[in-house]
Amino acid sequence: MNIVFTLTGPDRIGIVETVTGLVLDHKGNVETSRMARLGGEFAVLMLISLPEERLAGLEAAMAGLVAKGYRTSVNRTGQTYADVHYGWFHYRIEIHGADHEGIIHDIAHYLAKCGINIESMDTGTVRAPVSGAPLFSMIALVSVPPDLVGQGWESALEKVGHGLNVDVKVTAVTGKHPQ
């Protein structure tokens, strides 16, 4: 069986070792993960496969992390990515420009309106070398329905970016799409 496990809480050395050790102790395997320090907090998002009879034990073991100030959740997954999006096409979207409120929302709104699924998204800001002004960057992996390919959604997204004063680059991704 597969589960999605999340953890958020204080950043400390060894938290990844602790979490992955608990997974291994219950005969689980981390299939895919994302982890990041955000401010002083650490966030973990994992897709874990494990024998169904081991789930209750893993959940009980994770309760020890809650006692140390972490918040956790465990959710069984539904259909696999391949089942839900069979035949869809995959693209990488890169966005760069001056940071301001609403960039993520406006891009996500356009994609949702088109029926495009966001599979992953990483965003961040850095200071410009000379001026110190905040510069925004986004990298997103998306799945596009087959009937939308070749219909100009990429150029329309670039127009949305132009309105936001950011550069948008869309590239087709070949091969297996990451989960």
Image (cartoon, rainbow, N blue to C red):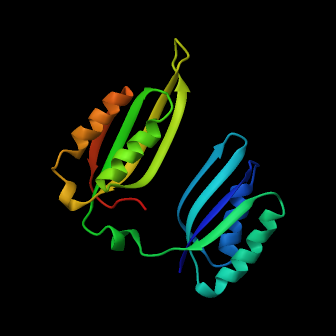
Whether residue 171 sits left or right of residue 60 in the image: it is left
Is 139 situated above or below 113?
Answer: above
- Which quadrant is home to the C terminus? bottom left
Q: Check the image and name the residue furthest to the bottom.
A: 53
Q: 176 or 136, which is in the foreground?
A: 136
Is 3 situated above or below 91?
Answer: below
Number of on-image labels: 0
Q: Check the image and name the residue furthest to the right.
A: 67
Query: Which residue appears at 71% of the width and 46% of the height?
Result: 41
Q: 31 or 153, which is in the foreground?
A: 153
Q: Check the image and name the residue furthest to the top.
A: 130
Query: Which residue appears at 52% of the width and 16% of the height?
Result: 129
Whether residue 154 sits left or right of residue 48 in the image: it is left
Whether residue 6 sits left or right of residue 174 in the image: it is right
Is 48 situated above or below 178?
Answer: below
User: How far across and down, in percent of the image, does residue 33 sit?
Assistant: 55, 59
User: How far across and down, in percent of the image, does residue 1 sit?
Assistant: 53, 81
Q: Check the image and name the residue furthest to the left.
A: 150
User: How far across and down, in percent of the image, does residue 169 sit?
Assistant: 30, 36
Whether residue 4 sits left or right of residue 16 in the image: it is left
User: How far across and down, in percent of the image, does residue 130 sit?
Assistant: 52, 11
Query: Which residue appears at 63% of the width and 56% of the height?
Result: 44
